Image (tube, rainbow, N blue to C red):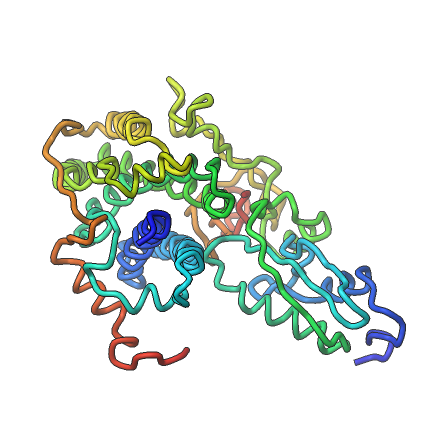
Amino acid sequence: MEAAAMLSTSRLSAAQVWSWLNEVPDPEIPVISVVDLGIVRGVQVTGDSACTVTITPTYSGCPAMQVIADAVTEALTARGVQHVQLHTQLSPAWTTDWMSESGKAKLKGYGIAPPAQQVIDISGLRHGGKGGLAAGVKRHAIAAPTVVCPHCGSSHTELTSQFGSTPCKALYKCLDCREPFDYFKCH
Amino acid sequence: MDAKVNYLLRQGDNALVLSQRLSELCGKGPALEEDMALTNVALDLLGQTRMWFTYAGELEGQGRDEDRIAYHRDAHDFKNCLLVEQPNGNYADTMVRQFFFDTWHYFLIGALAACQDTRIAEIAEKSLKEVTYHLRRSGDLVVRLGDGTDVSHRKTQAAVDDLWMYTGEFFAYDDVDQAMVAAGIAPPADQLRAQWLAHVADILAEATLTMPSPDAWMQKGGKQGRHSEHLGYLLAEMQFLQRAYPESQW
């Protein structure tokens, strides 16, 4: 490892930790970092060589969380941080809005359609203030997002399956270039 | 047992037992996409189970972690509703069971996300988007199966008729549920039941299926640990490793 990337004798800064974490790849989509994905929610420097990193799971059952926690700890200890504490935070719940623009661009370049702006409208299944179904609100009234093919850019695409290769993705196919692709679901 | 701990274990047991049922279909789904979807739903439910059990173990204060709660209890200590332990059957059985559960789960989790207990509200908030996605999917499939071919319609109607008697338990509140309502945590049974019936009626109508009577006789007992014969077999498989090699670590 280059000396410049190591913790110098000066005190640890949060900005430094963020930049190191920005190099930790997501284990399932290695093209983007855990920071790009919005999993790292906070960095707190707690001493000369100690910090607390707050992470949040994308999905409750995300099997990559342990790997991510280990990778974060390893990346920081490898750079000389002596005490790394990890804190898992559930609320506010992770949303694809936290994914960075550069992260979305990297996903697209990798062949995965990034989440569309439109978030699943939970209120579509719910009713006014009481939480029931609104009269006349039907299941399919909840608009499906327009997903753009990451290969040819066409928005003439079709959902193949609500779940793709991981819980955070759905499977689509492009009706123009005929290629199948993963779509990072909006949540 | 403290009412809140009991209530948390019920949430975790429902998610765990249904997750285990769905994972039985891993590699055996009727189509690749369905196989992936079912196992992904199972994964979401398993993640939710961990959050419920971890909180229950902390509140209880007897040093039980999520694994101990999942693997070191026998059937009579499980508090899941009878519906989730019912076998997968044919695909209509699997999807109707899922749809009945998802509808209840969606309205319950939605209410818990705004409840008085911060930790429960956080777990529910984390789960709500997943649960919403599950409900959209299972509702779609019930419509597709019910309003499909003659065979799929017949099998789906049979599944609705067979599983109906396990749905009353969601709303049969006992002392534990009532204590949670009083504590500002659980939604009132009447409200939950009305929401559940309205959505189920809507989807079954679109699926051209006949809804059984809401006043039909209903099974109950799961929440109090009285289960159908199916749960024992499910646990025997799920808990095999810890029963054969207690305390073994991954």
Question: Where is residue B3 shown, x and y percent of the image?
Answer: 33, 47
Could you tell me which quadrant the N terminus of chain B lies in? bottom left
Q: In x, y percent, where is residue A168?
A: 51, 52
Q: Is residue B137 visible?
A: yes
Viewer-proximal residue among B11 and A162: B11
| B200 to B26, vertically: above or below | above
A62 relative to A186, above or below:
below
Residue lying at 36% horizontally and 39% vertically, measured from the top left: B180
Whether residue B155 is visible to the viewer of this picture, yes or no, is no
The residue sitting at 56% across, 37% down in the picture is A119
Tell me where residue A185 appears, x and y as whole percent. Answer: 53, 46
Give the residue furthest to the right.
A10
Total marks in image: 0
Residue at image coords 40%, 21%: A134
Instruction: Establish if B7 lies above or below B249.
Output: above
Taking the image as shown, residue B63 lies to the left or right of residue A71, namely: left
Q: Residue furthest top?
A: A135
Report the front residue among B244 and A119. B244
Q: Is residue B105 left or right of residue A64?
A: left
The quadrant of the picture occupied by the C terminus of chain B is: bottom left
Q: Is residue A119 left or right of residue B81?
A: right
Left or right: residue A157 versus residue B216 is right
Query: B136 or B147: which is nearer to us?
Result: B136
Query: At which x and y percent is residue B225?
Result: 19, 54
Residue at left offset 38%, top offset 26%: A132
